[in-house]
């Protein structure tokens, strides 16, 4: 079998088609890695600088009523995580910054894609896309003739006549092709790892562990594709038929299924229009909803007066305005949780449709896992958005608390820099690897099934392959 | 042997081929599915546009009612939202939403319409940062992947179908040994290939155009005949490019398998690799400036403006005597002071934005040169532009909204500066946004260069095919 592996390996390397294709794919892979790294790094530096300036603005806002400071608010900028240079995921389509202010949960603004052109939407290329689309194509081109071609040329009978088993023959071919591919992929993986170690573009929880799992995911994907191609090559009557079938699989996997998933997910789990969403929030903020009533200010004042046993608000030991403002924050938070929570949940359910369709297109499972590990999927955007919103709520609580505690109703009260500096800055901890993988059980299962299924199919097809 | 004989023969052959029937049937299903998707999306946008316009009417009605009640002696509902105050009537409460109707052929190409905003609330506080808003609520994952619309089918899948039905148009005859027989008739290889391919082109392009026209009929797009014509012309030119390319490769007298490999490789390079490589190259050579700095600049401008309100008002009145209307800068009302600060922030934002936009326009102009390398990028550009969902139409809308916001401010600011109150008599004169949508001629002008280049590529491949086929002999 060693001979088969060596022969297949040298055959592939001598083949001009492969050399050209792999040079092209390798170049695209390296360039996209480099480009991704430069871009992620400069974006992260810019976001970190903007975040520092935002904090600076907050601290140097001078003497102010705490509620004015709450209205002034602070901007949060989404950090670019370390592995985002491999897979930028949905980052171009989510906003980069959000204004955290009193009374409102705002949307993330500044989507990079909105600044780009339509051309970028059909041809954005990241390392992840090279790995998901082009490497499988390369595998197909290398493998479609592996058995079908030998059979057509009549050399399959000769080979088997030497006493080598069919399974060894197929395994040898697979290993030879894998070896040739490794020449392309291992250096790219090393470059990626080096980029991560030498100059990590941004923060992340355990970036190296994430990177190793990411490499494992792509390895499983490529192995599945290799096994599938071998199976088809063993089964097809001619090399041409094998190629046509495999190209069909590639088109469905990479082009048709992902877009069908979009429409299917929208059809199964429709999102409201931006107008409906905004009007709904506005309406609920104005009137409250069942179970979440608007705070009743006179009743609140009565309660405060009774609690402290005084007659007039001026005699209260707390500022009634601060207490009321916090009450209405709490009310608003519940309305926002209802609406934004429902929207995010819909997005998540739509994501599950994409994941489920991986049953027909393994790319969908790999893409989900890849974005998850790179920290650039919708769930991790939500994770940051939730952290930013939690920070906003804490900020408002501090401002209203200071107003309530340190002033009396009717006072002209100004807080100073101590209060601004006392407020901790926004510190974001990216989710752990366990969190990411825990969210992605479905994709892991489907990808695993593809891998096992493809290997079993290859074994079965090779065993039954006709000799001539 | 006439062309008609060839055509009739071809029809029989095609219909006898089961695999081909299946492929054609599948393609028809995909076309109809894509169209259905587009129609659903266009209806969704049309409903939203309707709701936005109803909102405009509703807001005006509520204000008119309150103004009438106040005139009859009632108190305003809220001291802070008194509709007589020009900064309330012209502010968020009385704002007017400027809307861009869905592009006439949105059902065929979703284009940028799922990403870019198609309506803006305009009031006196509208400034450059107002244009930084998101468009429709949409899952970022879905935005990233893109929609399964007719434009997608045309750009990606149509070439594959074309190649599937024509990669062996001549090589098969040779491999079956019928080429010598065919060419022994008084007919040239050129005529044979032309007849065979015309038949296939008629079939494939006919299917795409039929479904397109059906979509246009259903969604009322025939009111823009220029766009319809442009769409059809682009589909035809793009499909023909792939047919002629197949003819060229066939004229090289190689095996069917070789033809298939080369043509699939060409598809991969022209449709997948080149657009991606172009985007990477442009990202490296001409990176787009980021908007993040704008957030900081805006913040700094407003901090500064708040601290220097009185000084800013004096300067504002000097710069805009037409707005002053006899206001004396030494004793300004609170509204005038606030307005001066707002205006200073707006000016600073305009500076930052115009710098950014100039750099962006420069980069995009550089990037757009590379698109001539890929027929797929050219076709995409013209198709979505014809549909009215391309970048240009949205940019045009945005600049009209900008002008409208200026008009809106001119209506209200003099009253703010003079601390005057307004009443119901101004309602009929309020500025209303009227979109001047681009004409078919504007779209055609923009499409001129890309379509010419696409045509040139077509002619180039055609000449190659013509010369090559001239050399084909029956004895090959």
Image (tube, rainbow, N blue to C red):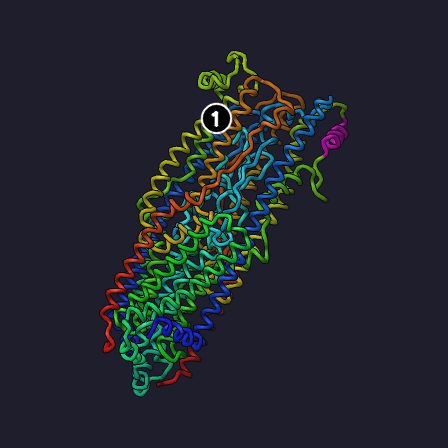
Mark 1: secondary structure: helix
For the question of whether residue A227 can be seen, the reply is: no
What's the magenta region? A296-309
Q: Quadrant of the C terminus of chain A?
A: bottom left
Quarter assignment of residue B270: bottom left
Whether the magenta-drawn stretch holds residue A301 is answered as yes
Q: Residue at x 31, y 47 (%)?
A: B369
Instruction: Work out whether A441 lies above or below A286.
Output: below
| Residue B9 spot, x, y in % from top left | 39, 76
| Percent position of residue B455, x then y | 33, 54
For label 1, count other residues whose C-alpha is less than 10 Å away and answer few (under 14), some (14-19) or many (20+).
Answer: some
Measured from the top left, where is residue A115 in percent x and y?
42, 43
Q: Which residue is mark 1?
A: B303
Q: Chain of mark 1?
A: B
Q: Position of residue B61 (x, y in %)?
A: 66, 33
The residue lying toward the viewer, choosing from B420 and B237, is: B237
Residue A123 appears in view: yes
- State left or right for residue A316 relative to residue A151: right
On screen, residue B136 versus residue A282, left or right, reads left
Q: Would you say B151 lies left or right of B241 here?
A: right
Dominant secondary-structure state across the stretch colored magenta: helix
Q: Nearer the viewer, residue A281 or B441?
A: B441
Is A316 one of the magenta-colored residues?
A: no
């Amino acid at each position: 079998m060693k001979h088969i592996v060596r022969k297949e390996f040298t055959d592939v390397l001598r083949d001009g088609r492969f050399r050209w294709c792999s040079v092209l794919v390798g170049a695209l892979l390296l360039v996209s890695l480099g480009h991704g790294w430069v871009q992620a790094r400069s974006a992260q530096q810019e976001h970190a600088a903007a975040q520092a300036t935002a904090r600076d603005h907050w601290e140097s806002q001078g003497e102010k009523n705490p509620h004015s400071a709450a209205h002034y608010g602070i901007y949060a900028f989404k950090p670019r995580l370390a592995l985002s240079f491999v897979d930028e995921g949905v980052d171009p389509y989510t906003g980069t910054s959000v204004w955290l202010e009193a009374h409102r949960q705002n949307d993330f603004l500044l989507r990079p894609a909105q600044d780009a052109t339509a051309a970028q939407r059909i041809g954005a290329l990241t390392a992840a896309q090279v790995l998901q689309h082009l490497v499988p194509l390369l595998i197909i081109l290398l493998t479609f003739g592996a058995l079908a071609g030998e059979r057509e040329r009549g050399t399959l009978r000769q080979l088997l006549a030497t006493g080598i088993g069919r399974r060894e023959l197929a395994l040898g071919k697979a290993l030879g092709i894998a070896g040739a591919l490794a020449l392309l992929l291992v250096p790219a993986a090393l470059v990626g790892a080096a980029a991560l170690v030498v100059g990590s573009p941004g923060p992340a929880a355990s970036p190296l562990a994430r990177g190793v799992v990411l490499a494992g995911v792509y390895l499983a994907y490529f192995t599945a594709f290799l096994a599938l191609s071998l199976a088809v090559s063993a089964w097809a009557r001619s090399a041409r038929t094998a190629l046509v079938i495999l190209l069909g699989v590639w088109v469905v996997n990479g082009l048709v299924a992902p877009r069908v998933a979009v429409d299917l997910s929208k059809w199964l789990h429709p999102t409201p229009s931006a107008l409906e969403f905004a009007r709904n929030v506005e309406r609920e903020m104005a009137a409250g909803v069942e179970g979440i009533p608007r705070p009743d200010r006179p009743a609140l004042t009565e309660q405060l007066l009774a609690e402290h046993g005084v007659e007039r608000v001026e005699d209260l030991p707390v500022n009634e305005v601060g207490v009321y403002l916090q009450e209405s924050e709490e009310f608003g938070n519940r309305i926002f949780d209802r609406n934004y929570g429902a929207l995010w949940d819909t997005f998540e359910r739509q994501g599950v449709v994409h994941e489920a369709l991986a049953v027909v297109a393994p790319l969908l499972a790999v893409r989900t896992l890849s974005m998850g590990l790179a920290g650039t999927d919708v769930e991790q955007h939500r994770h940051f958005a939730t952290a930013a919103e939690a920070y906003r709520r804490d900020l408002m609580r501090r401002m209203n608390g200071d107003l309530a505690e340190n002033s009396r109703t009717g006072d002209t009260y100004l807080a100073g820099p101590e209060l601004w500096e006392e407020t901790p800055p926004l510190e974001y901890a990216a989710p752990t690897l366990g969190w990411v993988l825990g969210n992605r059980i479905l994709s892991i299962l489907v990808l695993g099934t593809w891998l096992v299924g493809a290997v079993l199919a290859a074994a079965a097809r090779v065993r039954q392959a006709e000799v001539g | 042997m006439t062309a008609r004989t060839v055509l009739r023969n071809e029809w029989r052959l095609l219909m006898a081929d089961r695999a081909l029937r299946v492929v054609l049937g599948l393609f028809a299903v995909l076309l109809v599915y894509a169209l259905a998707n587009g129609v659903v999306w266009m209806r969704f946008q049309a409903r939203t546009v309707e709701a936005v316009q109803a909102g405009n009417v509703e807001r005006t009605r509520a204000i008119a009612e309150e103004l009438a009640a106040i005139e009859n002696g009632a108190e305003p509902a809220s001291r802070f939202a008194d509709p007589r105050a020009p900064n309330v009537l012209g502010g968020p409460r009385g704002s007017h939403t400027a809307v861009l109707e869905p592009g006439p052929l949105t059902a065929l190409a979703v284009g940028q319409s799922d990403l870019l905003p198609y309506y803006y609330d305009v009031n006196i506080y509208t400034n450059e940062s107002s244009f930084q808003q998101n468009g429709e609520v949409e899952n970022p994952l879905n935005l990233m992947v893109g929609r399964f619309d007719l434009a997608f089918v045309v750009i990606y899948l149509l070439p594959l179908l074309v190649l599937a039905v024509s990669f062996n148009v001549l090589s098969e005859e040779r491999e079956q040994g019928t080429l010598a027989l065919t060419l022994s008739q008084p007919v040239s290889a050129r005529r044979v290939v032309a007849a065979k391919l015309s038949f296939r082109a008629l079939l494939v392009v006919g299917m795409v155009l039929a479904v397109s026209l059906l979509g246009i009929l259903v969604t009322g797009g025939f009111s823009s005949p220029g766009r319809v014509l442009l769409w059809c012309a682009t589909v035809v030119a793009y499909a023909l490019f792939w047919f002629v390319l197949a003819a060229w490769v066939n004229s090289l007298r190689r095996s069917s398998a070789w033809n298939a490999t080369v043509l699939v490789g060409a598809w991969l390079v022209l449709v997948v690799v080149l657009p991606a490589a172009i985007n990477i190259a442009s990202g490296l050579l001409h990176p787009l400036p980021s908007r993040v700095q704008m957030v900081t600049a805006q913040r700094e401008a407003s901090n500064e403006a708040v601290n220097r309100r009185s000084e800013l008002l004096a300067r504002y009145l000097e710069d805009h005597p037409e707005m002053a209307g006899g206001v004396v800068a030494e004793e300004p009302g609170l509204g005038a002071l606030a307005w001066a600060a707002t205006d200073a922030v707006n000016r600073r934002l305009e500076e930052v934005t115009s710098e950014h936009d100039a750099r962006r326009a420069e980069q995009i102009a550089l990037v757009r040169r590379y698109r001539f390398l890929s027929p797929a990028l050219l076709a995409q550009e013209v198709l979505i532009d014809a549909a009215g969902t391309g970048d240009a139409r949205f940019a045009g809308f945005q600049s009209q909204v900008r002008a409208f916001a200026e008009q809106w401010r001119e209506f209200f600011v003099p009253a703010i500066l003079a601390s005057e109150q307004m009443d119901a008599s101004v309602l009929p004169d309020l500025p209303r946004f009227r979109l001047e949508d681009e004409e078919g001629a504007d779209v055609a002008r923009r499409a001129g260069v890309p379509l010419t280049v696409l045509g040139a590529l077509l002619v180039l491949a055609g000449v190659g095919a013509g010369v090559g086929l001239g050399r084909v002999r029956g004895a090959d």
